[in-house]
């Protein structure tokens, strides 16, 4: 079946694109458009052609299902389609409703006329994938809406509603009512009035002070987009639209496109784009698995996490009942939620009406009776198995039959928690990250008994509250924290051997991490890691740790909350200030241990810390705790401040080359004697086979 239906309406041919959901311009659709155009040109009774999409989309651009496949470039390519449309001897009119983005907009720009409904979404979002519009968008859009407006759209990738272009030649007419009928009527007018074949390429841009403007644009864009090359290439391409003949501009656009597609930054952005989509899928849970309805949510515990978790649902318009053991704690928790909303109000990010609406959806309570109607109950009480047991036994008594019972535990065994109930199939981990109302990541922890419809429902609700959900199996630390423990452990040894905490943090931050390990420890509270280590000393005595962190904690230096940790903090401020006291502490520690400090380079810091993440990730993949390599990257990009332009620890390792990662790990193993550095079998195997994770 063709993806472009052909029909005639008097003297007008109608080519209707039909490739749901968004008319992605895949091979079949492109071929269909060309076939329709050929038919119209061959029919003497036809005088003009209308190209239309669906109510949802004229076209959302390239078909992502074809990305990286030969079909994406097969003829007729998008370039060819646009050339044929623009060169048509009969006028072609684009009828635009819904999404008109990327290649879809470029196709519309190749048409002789464009009509649109208000509310259509117009964008050239390619920059978000680290590339630029590659089918003439950078050359044609400025000719219609002016260089500055086009540059803003192309550099930012922002979606602009069609009505904002009223008065520009981008749209020849706005249609009220039915788009198809309006477009056909417009086409008849074009024929009757013998209007010319308007080609955007023939337009000239009159911009007297172009050079000065583009220089200014380069400076501004360069400063903002420091890790990404695409935005600057966009500026150059738009500048060419103004200063050079059309075909030269097209050549420059093409060259930039080919260059950008190959950059690691673009690969990273595309990896994240597809990684996000892949993460929402669970191998053995089919996409059509029925889900449970979630209209009322219960949250147990109104502390740091409970409050943030509640806000996610309130923001999405879902009613939340929040339960505490004491009135005082309840009031404090609700007060913090209100305060957060009031701060947003002050910053102009929230209206009073929205604030009232959200607070109106929140019901504080001390009684479990109020949770009997809840469809989903998330526990966020103290991290103690006894307290969790008490809560889950109680929930088992009061929750309705098909309610989902979730725990936000960071370290406890979800299977054990599930077995406190008589319905382990309804129990799942929902591991939010702090601050829970801000951080994108949600680790969905799948217990041995967790039912498939529970998983499907949680993945769906995660989308609704705008989280990136990644499934993890049950293990100590799940995906993210199990990896970070080794990263922190390695950072500790670097300090023991000769680096300062601030050197380690600075090196990693310069490399792109949002925060180095020591600043992160100070933020999260060094006591948390300390508690975990104390447990490890008993459970896994073979795993070695640098003990400086313990000494630090013994002095009560827990981090920001105590005004000092690895750094010192001035009252009310969050700036981490290197502290000579810590220098002295480290010096004494080394002396006591007989360690002669050595010079450690930034490159070594990056290698050790990042490859530690990679080696542990390989073990997680092997054990099936993580479903796929890109899931690990999504965890790090959305929950741990890993630099987006590097695409996650695994993509980074793939790009460095696994052979090199393995060699480094072997070297670290020999130097440190730490068994951790034995390359994980999966890593070693892939490296030996010359393969990559992704
Ligand atoms: N803080 C983090 O960064 C973070 C991140 C992810 C997960 N978690 C997990 O979230 C959970 C909560 O952590 P938090 O940082 O919000 O702790 P918190 O101490 O700030 O809050 C816990 C709240 O639970 C309440 N509470 C205790 N027992 C209760 C009970 N039986 N019934 C009802 N309420 C009870 C307490 O009064 C307190 O307000 C823990 O399991 C923790 O491991 C914490």
Image: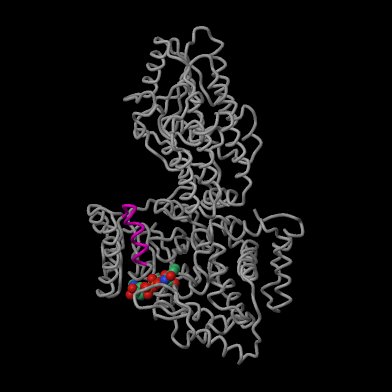
User: In the image, is residue 426 part of the stretch drawn in magenta?
Assistant: no
Residue 584 in view, yes or no: yes
Q: Is residue 313 left or right of residue 248?
A: left
Q: Is residue 44 above or below residue 235?
A: above
x and y, in percent, of residue 275 in the image: 55, 51
Q: What residue appears at the point 59 percent right and 82 percent down from the top-left corner?
A: 546
Q: In terms of depth relative to the viewer, which is nearer, 480 or 539?
A: 480
Farthest residue in the top direction? 44
Image quarter where the N terminus lies is top right
x and y, in percent, of residue 215 in the image: 48, 45
Q: In terms of depth relative to the viewer, which is nearer, 40 or 194?
A: 194
Q: What residue appears at the point 62 percent right and 59 percent down from the top-left corner?
A: 650
Q: Is residue 405 above or below residue 111?
A: below
Residue range of the region highlighted in magenta in the rendering: 306-318
Q: Is residue 59 left or right of residue 679?
A: left
Q: Is residue 589 left or right of residue 325?
A: right
Dominant secondary structure (helix, strand or loop) of the stretch shown in magenta:
helix
User: Ligand 1 is found in which quarter of the picture?
Assistant: bottom left
Farthest residue in the right direction? 688
x and y, in percent, of residue 223 in the image: 48, 54
Residue 284 in view, yes or no: no
Q: Is residue 148 left or right of residue 240?
A: left
Determine which quarter of the picture holds residue 478.
bottom right
x and y, in percent, of residue 124 in the image: 48, 38
């Amino acid at each position: 079946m063709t993806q472009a239906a052909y029909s005639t309406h008097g003297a007008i041919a109608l080519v209707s694109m039909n490739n749901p959901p968004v008319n992605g311009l895949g091979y079949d659709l492109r071929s269909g458009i060309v076939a329709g155009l050929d038919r119209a040109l061959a029919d003497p009774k036809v005088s003009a052609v209308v190209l239309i999409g669906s109510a949802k989309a004229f076209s959302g651009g390239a078909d992502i299902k074809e990305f990286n496949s030969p079909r994406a470039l097969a003829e007729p390519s998008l370039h060819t389609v646009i050339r044929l449309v623009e060169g048509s001897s009969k006028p072609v009119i684009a009828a635009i409703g819904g999404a008109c983005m990327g290649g879809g907009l470029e196709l519309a720009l190749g048409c002789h006329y464009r009509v649109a409904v208000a509310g259509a979404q117009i964008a050239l979002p390619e920059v978000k994938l680290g590339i630029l519009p590659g089918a003439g968008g950078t050359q044609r859009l400025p000719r219609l809406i002016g260089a500055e407006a086009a540059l803003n759209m192309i550099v930012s990738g922002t979606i602009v509603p069609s009505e904002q272009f009223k008065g520009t030649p981008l749209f020849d007419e706005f249609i009220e009512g039915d788009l198809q009928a309006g477009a056909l009527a417009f086409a008849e007018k074009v024929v009757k009035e013998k209007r010319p074949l308007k080609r955007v390429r023939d337009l000239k841009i009159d911009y007297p002070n172009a050079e000065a403007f583009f220089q200014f644009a380069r400076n501004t864009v360069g400063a903002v987009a420091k890790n990404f090359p695409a935005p600057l290439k966009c500026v150059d391409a738009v500048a060419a639209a103004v200063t050079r003949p059309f075909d030269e501009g097209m050549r420059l656009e093409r060259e930039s496109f080919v260059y950008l597609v190959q950059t690691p930054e673009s690969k990273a952005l595309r990896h994240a784009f597809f990684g996000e989509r892949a993460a929402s899928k669970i191998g053995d849970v089919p996409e059509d698995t029925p889900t449970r309805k979630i209209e009322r949510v219960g949250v147990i515990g109104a502390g740091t996490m409970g409050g943030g978790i509640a806000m996610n649902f309130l923001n999405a318009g879902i009613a939340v009942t929040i339960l505490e053991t004491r009135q005082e704690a309840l009031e404090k928790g609700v007060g913090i939620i209100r305060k957060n909303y009031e701060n947003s109000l002050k910053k102009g990010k929230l209206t009073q009406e929205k604030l009232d609406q959200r607070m109106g959806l929140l019901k504080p309570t001390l009684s479990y009776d109020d949770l009997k109607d809840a469809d989903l109950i998330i526990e966020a009480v103290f991290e103690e198995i006894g307290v969790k047991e008490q809560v889950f036994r109680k929930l088992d008594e009061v929750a309705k039959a098909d309610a989902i019972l979730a725990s936000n535990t960071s370290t406890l065994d979800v299977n054990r928690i599930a077995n406190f109930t008589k319905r382990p199939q309804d129990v799942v981990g929902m591991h939010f990250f702090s601050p829970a109302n801000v951080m994108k990541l949600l680790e969905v922890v799948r217990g041995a008994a967790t039912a498939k419809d529970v998983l499907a429902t949680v993945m769906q609700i995660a989308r609704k509250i705008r989280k990136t959900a990644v499934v993890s199996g049950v293990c100590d630390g799940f995906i993210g924290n199990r990896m970070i423990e080794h990263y922190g452990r390695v950072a500790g040894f670097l300090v023991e051997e000769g680096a300062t905490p601030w050197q380690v943090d600075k090196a990693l931050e310069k490399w792109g991490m949002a925060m180095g390990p020591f600043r992160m420890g100070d933020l999260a509270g060094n006591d948390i890691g300390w508690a975990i280590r104390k447990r490890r000393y008993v459970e896994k005595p073979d795993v070695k740790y640098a003990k400086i962190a313990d000494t630090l904690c013994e002095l009560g230096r827990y981090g920001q909350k105590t005004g000092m940790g690895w750094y010192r903090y001035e009252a009310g401020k969050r700036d981490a200030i290197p502290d000579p006291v810590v220098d002295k502490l480290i010096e004494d520690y080394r002396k006591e241990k007989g360690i002669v400090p050595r010079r450690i380079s930034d490159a070594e810091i990056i290698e050790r810390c990042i490859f530690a993440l990679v080696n542990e990730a390989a073990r997680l993949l092997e054990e099936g705790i993580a479903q796929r390599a890109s899931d690990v990257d999504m965890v790090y990009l959305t929950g741990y401040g890993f630099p987006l332009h590097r695409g996650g620890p695994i993509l980074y390792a793939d790009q460095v080359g696994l052979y090199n990662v393995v060699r480094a790990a072997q070297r670290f193993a020999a130097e440190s004697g730490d068994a951790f550095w034995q390359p994980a079998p999966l890593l070693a195997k892939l490296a030996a086979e010359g393969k990559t994770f992704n």
